[in-house]
Image (cartoon, rainbow, N blue to C red):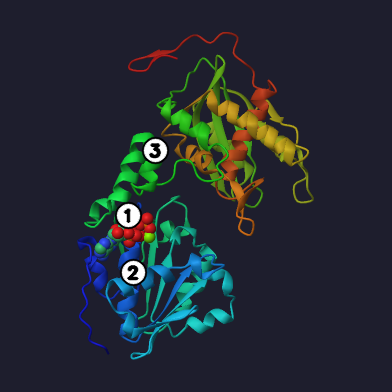
């Protein structure tokens, strides 16, 4: 082992990372000294003869890797003489330590085994790391005492790395949130950039610098409309109005989620008063949920497959729900192609712009509408037109069902709704 005394500065918040741990996870907004810490750590480990990999989800060239950052760490600490830097790796010849730089796209189930004897792996930009990559990398690094380091700027609470470390962290993990406030060496350039963004767009600054989750995700379909709803205080307390019928809008999950919105027309606008979703339940379950709520229903809007009959189900969802006691069950027309789907999404946008959402009862649905987004083409690095099929798409599809019904005047508008006046809420 080499004994080299070179100055290394460590932010106080990251000191717990100096003790051994299987996982070391650092998340937060920009400028939190995360990359410099792990860069310095990589340099130390290499001097001590360890082998490590800097890895990210996608890497097409070394410019996209942390290699430059680590070279800068070496230069800053005047350690150039101890390292050999090539276009593929950084090595310490005296100790035998080495760092390589990879993307998970360069590995398959077989060649990833080459990492089995590595001492550490640093997953930078871990918000992009997929569940498959986590499942592949973690068990591969199996040398005794080997460590996985994770650093990222949070984006969605549903990103696999957030689920892994922030919702139910493993017992062998040290998880630290760190931001610009904790970085004693924050350069003026970054500080000014931060102040500027907080002045111009507080919402975005809270994500980029505050380490919060993104309110409008990239490729968001309803993001702008949901942000407007929030800014205009339309995500609030919205009570049930017994004098106006409640309509439900559905997405029917055959093998996955079923989602249901509960809404009341109010003048030209809509009140989203409730939301329900579940997975792998049968129609009697959903009918019971509907019946158990104290609402006076005007009708139930199903997507086009509400009319489908299969060998397994001789009765369509519409027929079954009617049999289960729901009245006025209607099926909206099928969107013939992607262009028609996009047209229906436009109705969904318009409907959001005139809707008040109940922040508590609709919280799951609201989050899904905020995060519903288009598919990303990793090769072309652009968003496709097609919406991404994920846990957000079912509530968003149910919203679209309601929007198509609303646009097609399928919802029975109340003749003249009496204005409801509530304490602290005002006339609606
Ligand atoms: N140990 C350190 N010693 C001196 N300066 C530091 C140190 N760590 C960070 N800095 C300064 O703070 C800046 C931000 O640090 P760093 O790039 O590590 O943050 P980060 O958390 O990775 O940010 P981002 O989320 O934007 O990637 C660096 O460019 C550097 O100027
Ligand atoms: Mg960084």
User: How far apart are the alpha carbons under marks 2 and 1?
Assistant: 14 Å
Q: Depth check: give the residue in front, 2 or 188.
A: 188
Look at the image and tell me in which quarter the N terminus lies: bottom left
Q: Which residue is mark 2?
A: 38
Q: Residue at x 36, y 62 (%)?
A: 169
Helix, strand or loop under label 3 = helix
Residue 423, x across and y down, in percent: 33, 15
Q: Is residue 31 above or below residue 61?
A: above
Q: Residue at x 47, y 10 (%)?
A: 419
State which quadrant residue 237 falls in: top left
Report if the beta carbon of the residue with label 1 is closer than 8 angstroms to ligand 1: yes
Residue 415 is at least partly visible in this image: yes
Residue 101 got which mark? none
Q: Depth check: give the residue in front, 91 or 142.
A: 91
Residue 163, x across and y down, in percent: 43, 57
Q: Which residue is mark 3?
A: 203
Helix, strand or loop under label 1 = loop
Q: Alpha-carbon neighbours of circle 1 within 10 Å: few (<14), some, or many (≥20)?
A: many
Q: Residue at x 35, y 75 (%)?
A: 42
Asked if marks 2 and 1 touch (Cβ < 8 Å), the reply is no
Helix, strand or loop under label 2 = helix
Residue 176 is at least partly visible in this image: no
- Left or right of residue 305, residue 173 in this image: left
Residue 90, x across and y down, in percent: 42, 80
Q: Earlier in the sequence, mark 3 or mark 1?
A: 1
Q: Which residue is mark 1?
A: 31
């Amino acid at each position: 082992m080499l004994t080299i005394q070179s100055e290394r500065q460590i932010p106080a918040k990251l000191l717990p990372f100096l003790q051994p741990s299987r996982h070391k996870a650092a998340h937060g907004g920009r400028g939190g000294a995360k990359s410099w810490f792990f860069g310095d750590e990589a340099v130390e480990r290499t001097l001590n003869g360890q082998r490590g990999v800097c890895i990210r989800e996608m890497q097409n060239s070394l410019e996209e890797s942390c290699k430059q950052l680590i070279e800068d760490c070496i230069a800053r600490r005047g350690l150039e003489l101890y390292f050999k830097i090539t276009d593929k790796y950084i090595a310490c010849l005296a100790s035998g330590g080495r760092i390589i730089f990879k993307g998970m796209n360069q590995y398959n189930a077989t060649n990833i085994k080459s990492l089995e004897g590595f001492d550490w792996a640093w997953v930078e930009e871990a918000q992009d790391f997929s569940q498959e990559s986590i499942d592949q990398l973690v068990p591969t690094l199996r040398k005794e005492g080997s460590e996985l380091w994770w650093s990222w700027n949070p984006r969605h609470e549903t990103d696999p790395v957030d689920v892994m470390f922030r919702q139910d962290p493993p017992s062998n993990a040290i998880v630290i949130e760190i931001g610009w406030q904790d970085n004693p060496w924050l350069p003026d350039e970054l500080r000014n950039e931060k102040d500027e963004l907080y002045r111009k767009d507080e919402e975005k600054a809270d994500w980029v610098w505050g380490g919060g989750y993104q309110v409008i995700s990239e490729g968001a379909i309803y993001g702008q409309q949901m942000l407007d709803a929030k800014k205009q205080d339309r995500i609030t307390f919205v009570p049930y109005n017994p004098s106006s019928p409640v309509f439900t809008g559905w997405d029917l999950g055959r093998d996955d989620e079923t989602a249901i919105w509960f809404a009341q027309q109010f003048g030209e606008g809509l009140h989203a008063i409730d939301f329900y979703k579940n997975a792998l339940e049968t129609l009697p379950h959903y009918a019971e949920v509907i019946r158990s709520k104290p609402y006076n229903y005007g009708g139930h809007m199903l997507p086009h497959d509400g009319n489908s009959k299969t060998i397994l189900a001789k009765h369509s969802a519409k027929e079954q729900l009617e049999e289960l006691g729901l009245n006025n069950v209607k099926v909206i027309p099928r969107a013939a192609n992607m262009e028609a789907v996009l047209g229906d999404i436009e109705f969904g946008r318009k409907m959001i712009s005139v809707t008040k959402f109940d922040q508590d009862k609709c919280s799951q649905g609201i989050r899904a509408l905020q995060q519903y987004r288009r598919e990303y083409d990793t090769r072309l690095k652009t968003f496709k037109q097609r919406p991404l099929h994920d846990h957000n798409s079912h509530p968003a599809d149910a919203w679209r069902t309601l929007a198509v019904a609303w646009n097609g005047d399928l919802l029975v508008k109340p003749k003249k709704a009496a204005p409801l006046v509530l304490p602290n809420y005002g006339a609606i």
